[in-house]
Image: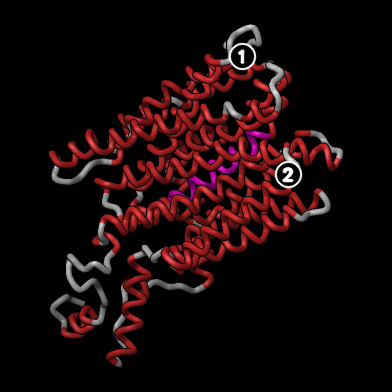
């Protein structure tokens, strides 16, 4: 049917869109202040989820002591939580496309707070492990959705700086949590208050979400606008483009839920980038098991001081955030200005290349300066370099996937979250045996060699990505 056909023109007139290119209802046209506030609120949701993930690592020795189990078994509470991170994205990523970002964040985060309360009051190990797993499933919603939500209202030019905030929240939560968790667990409050703290933080953020978090999905906003216009005008043919999509359960299961897994299986870019991101993310959680070995067992520090080196990782991520922000504001923005406001996804890779070179170096420094006769400061330098490299790799990977798969950005981020969560669940379980059996020096050397091998991925895509 041609576009000149009267029926076609009539049908096109029934499609609801924005009133004008400058319509402020369009998230892309929101005032900058509203965009920044929304970014910060989305970031805080993410930080609650990741904070709860690693605070358990500090309390696990006390749980092991109370329930008379080994430290490796107690760490299952961390790994099961991260395993939930792998399951949740397959549900919440596509669901946010159908029902909107706002409800798909608020409801799961409220349920997550309930599971955290159940962990805090648990009287046996089974309850702890079950509630940690389902808490991880629920809290994965902002970790999955926020990357795509930022693409809803930030342009390609400005998105890199926004992702810096998101990435810092992902890293800031788990690097601060072990220090806070160790201090709480050592005090009269006991380890249960690490979970109560998660409940308090999460419920505070959920209340802020209910009051201030706007819907960011254009498809959902236009669908809501179409519903309102149908009621106001009585023109029942009015509809949004999103309402033309088949939302049946079979379509949701076969097409939408499976899309992240299909991308992992069929897209080399998604598979390799998410594998590299997954390894670096798993290392972040592996450090929570390795740092007590390096500083508490090896150097004889007390539990709370032995948790403080986690802050070196945080310092590294702040340095990486500054590098990423400078690259986005100066080099990337200048490229877009000179190329008609467009840039290929491969222009996101230079920070990842820097991280890929520094990543193994950080491991080698951390491992071979860990002897008790050597001052602890060089080991902190190694941790700082590892933390910096992690964020350079992690953030560039997210930007690369969003730019490469803009229309399916949420599904690409869901695939990334799924892959990295599998690594995050597995690596902490093998870290303690590996560091005890190989020794700190050779365990760090092994990790550095793996990091060096994977470090070729950004250089590969920089050269052949467009092809």
- Quadrant of residue 288 within the rendered picture: top right
Q: Residues within 10 Å of mark 1 (few under 14, many from 20)?
A: many
**Stretch in magenta:** 412-428
Left or right? Give the position of 229 relative to 361: left
Q: Earlier in the sequence, mark 2 or mark 1?
A: 2
- Quadrant of residue 357 within the rendered picture: top left
| Disc assigned to residue 396 | none
Residue 340 shows in this picture: yes
Dots 2, 1 in contact, CB < 8 A:
no
Residue 262 shows in this picture: no
Q: Which residue is at 72% across, 26% downward?
A: 433
Estimate the x, y position of residue 374 in percent, counting from the top left: 60, 8
Local SS, label 2: loop
* Tag 1 residue: 370
Local SS, label 1: loop
Look at the magenta stretch and give its main secondary structure: helix
Q: Is residue 445 magenta?
A: no
Q: Which residue is at 50% across, 39% downward?
A: 171
Figure coloring: secondary structure
- Disc 2 to disc 1, how far (Cα)? 29 Å
* Tag 2 residue: 191
Estimate the x, y position of residue 344 in percent, counting from the top left: 25, 41
Relative depth, front residue between 82 and 316: 316
Query: Is residue 3 positioned above or below 124 on the image?
Result: below
Which quadrant: the N terminus?
bottom left
Which quadrant: the C terminus?
top left
Estimate the x, y position of residue 185 in percent, counting from the top left: 72, 40
């Amino acid at each position: 049917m041609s576009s000149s056909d009267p029926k076609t023109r009539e049908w096109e007139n029934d499609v609801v869109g924005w009133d004008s290119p400058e319509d402020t209802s369009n998230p892309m046209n929101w005032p900058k202040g509203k965009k920044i506030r929304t970014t910060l609120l989305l970031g805080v949701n993410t930080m609650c989820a990741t904070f709860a993930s690693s605070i358990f690592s500090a309390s696990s020795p006390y749980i092991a002591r109370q329930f008379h189990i080994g430290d490796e078994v107690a760490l299952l509470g961390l790994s099961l939580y991260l395993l939930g991170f792998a399951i949740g994205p397959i549900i919440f990523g596509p669901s946010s496309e159908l029902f909107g970002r706002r409800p798909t964040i608020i409801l799961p985060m409220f349920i997550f707070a309930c599971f955290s309360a159940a962990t805090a009051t648990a009287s046996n190990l089974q309850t702890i492990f079950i509630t940690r797993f389902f808490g991880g499933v629920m809290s994965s919603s902002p970790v999955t959705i926020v990357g795509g939500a930022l693409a809803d209202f930030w342009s390609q030019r400005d998105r890199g700086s926004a992702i810096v905030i998101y990435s810092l929240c992902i890293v800031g939560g788990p690097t601060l949590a072990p220090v806070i968790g160790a201090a709480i667990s050592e005090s009269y409050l006991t380890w249960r208050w690490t979970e109560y703290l998660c409940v308090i933080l999460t419920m505070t953020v959920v209340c802020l979400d209910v009051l201030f978090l706007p819907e960011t999905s254009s498809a959902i906003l236009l669908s809501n606008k179409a519903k309102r216009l149908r009621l106001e005008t009585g023109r029942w043919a009015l509809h949004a483009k999103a309402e033309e999509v088949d939302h049946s359960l079979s379509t949701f299961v076969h097409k939408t839920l499976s899309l992240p897994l299909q991308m992992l299986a069929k897209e080399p870019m998604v598979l390799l980038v998410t594998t590299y991101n997954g390894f670096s993310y798993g290392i972040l959680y592996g450090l929570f098991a390795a740092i007590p070995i390096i500083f508490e067992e090896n150097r004889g520090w007390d539990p709370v001081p032995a948790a403080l080196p986690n802050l070196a990782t945080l310092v590294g991520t702040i340095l990486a955030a500054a590098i990423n922000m400078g690259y986005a504001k100066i080099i990337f923005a200048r490229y877009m200005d000179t190329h008609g406001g467009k840039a290929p996804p491969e222009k996101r890779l230079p920070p990842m290349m820097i991280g890929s070179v520094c990543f193994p170096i950080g491991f080698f420094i951390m491992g071979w300066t860990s002897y008790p006769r050597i001052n602890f400061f060089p080991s902190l330098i190694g941790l700082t370099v590892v933390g910096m490299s992690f964020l350079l790799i992690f953030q560039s990977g997210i930007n690369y996937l969003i730019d490469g798969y803009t229309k399916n950005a949420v599904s690409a981020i869901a695939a990334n979250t799924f892959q990295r969560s599998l690594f995050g669940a597995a690596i902490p379980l093998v870290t303690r045996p590996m560091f005890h059996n190989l020794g700190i020096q050779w365990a760090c050397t092994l990790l550095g060699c793996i990091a060096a091998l994977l470090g070729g991925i950004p250089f590969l895509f920089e050269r052949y990505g467009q092809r």
